[in-house]
Amino acid sequence: MEKKVKVAVVGLGFGAEFVPLYQKHPNAECYAICQRSKEHLNEVGEQFGVERRFTRFEDLLKIEELDAIHIITPVAAHAPMTLASLKAGK
């Protein structure tokens, strides 16, 4: 069996809809979620059974086993988060 791609979903407004898609995908895993609001983060985490939860995007970048970061945040945050993700090898 091939290794599943470990993905973190960042931004859980519209982004929460991607969590079950990664969970159902045969080659991917929703490894972690990230949202500034801890309350909403925990709601989504409980709803989909995601244990790894972060309120700080910077903390995701430190997870060595994470393969990719799906950024679904307000548009103004896309460029800096994408550049930081690429620099971290994600």
Image (cartoon, rainbow, N blue to C red):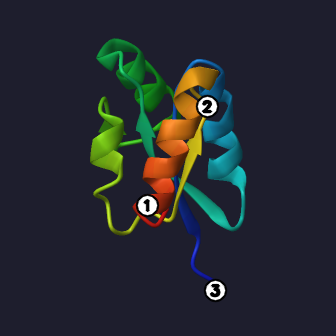
Which quadrant of the figure has residue 26? bottom right
Q: How many marks?
A: 3
Residue for badge 3? 1
For the N terminus, the image quarter is bottom right
Callout 2 secondary element: loop
The amino acid beneath tag 1 is: Lys
Tell me the amino acid under the disc marked 2. Answer: Ile
Say above or below: 51 vs 27.
Answer: above
At 70% across and 51% down in the image, what residue appears?
A: 24
Tell me what residue is drawn at x 60 percent, y 39 percent.
19
Pointer 1 with pointer 3, Cβ within 8 A: no
Mark 1 sits on what residue? 87
Instruction: Read off the residue under disc 2.
Output: 72
Residue ranking furthest to the bottom: 1
Residue beneath the point at 47% across and 53% down: 85
Q: Is residue 49 visible?
A: yes
Disc sitting over residue 4 in the figure: none
